[in-house]
Amino acid sequence: MSPALCLAVAGQLLATLPVAEFTLTWTHSVQKTLWHEHYRIDGRRLVLDEAQVQGSGAGMEPAADAVWRDGAWHWRPA
């Protein structure tokens, strides 16, 4: 069986997506900069593989080992 992402709210299934990985992207409400988090499904676990942010400040500090590349800080969360 291939991996699938199930989206649920308050115990109610809303959608099932046949994906093994995906990226969430949003604009930070204060700094107005993009934030990306790349996830993958590992069995029954959801794993955060990488985070990226196009700046820092207001609760969005990159990790100490973050690398600046292609206009954003990139790191692998612990």
Image (cartoon, grey):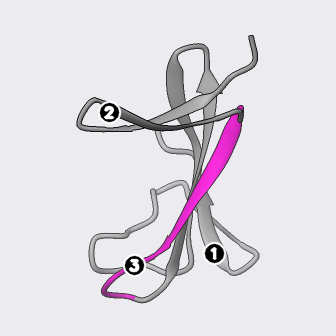
24 sits to left or right of 7: right
- Asked if marks 2 and 1 touch (Cβ < 8 Å), the reply is no
- The residue at the point 71 percent across, 32 percent down is 20
Instruction: Count neighbours of disc 3 (C-alpha within 10 A) and say few if under 14, some if 14 to 19, many if 20 or more.
Output: some
Q: Give the residue type at disc 1.
A: Ala
> Is 62 located above or below residue 3 in the figure?
below
Residue 21 is inside the magenta segment: yes
Magenta stretch, residue numbers: 20-31
- Choose mark 3 or mark 2, whichever is in front: 2
**Residue 30, how many percent across, how many down?**
31, 87
> Is 20 located above or below residue 50 in the figure?
above
Whichever of callouts 2 and 1 sits on the residue coming sooner in the sequence is: 2
- The residue at the point 54 percent across, 54 percent down is 65
> Is 4 located above or below residue 25 in the figure?
above
For the residues labelled 3 and 2, the Cα–Cα distance comes to: 28 Å
- Choose mark 1 or mark 3, whichever is in front: 3
**Residue 31, how many percent across, how many down?**
37, 88
Instruction: Count neighbours of disc 1 (C-alpha within 10 A) and say few if under 14, some if 14 to 19, many if 20 or more.
Output: many
Q: Give the residue type at disc 3.
A: His
Residue where numbered disc 3 is placed: 28
- The residue at the point 42 percent across, 78 percent down is 56
For the residues labelled 2 and 1, the Cα–Cα distance comes to: 36 Å
64 sits to left or right of 75: left
Residue 12 is tagged as 2
Residue where numbered disc 1 is placed: 72
**Which one is in front, 69 or 1?**
1
**Where is residue 63, by image quadrant?**
bottom left
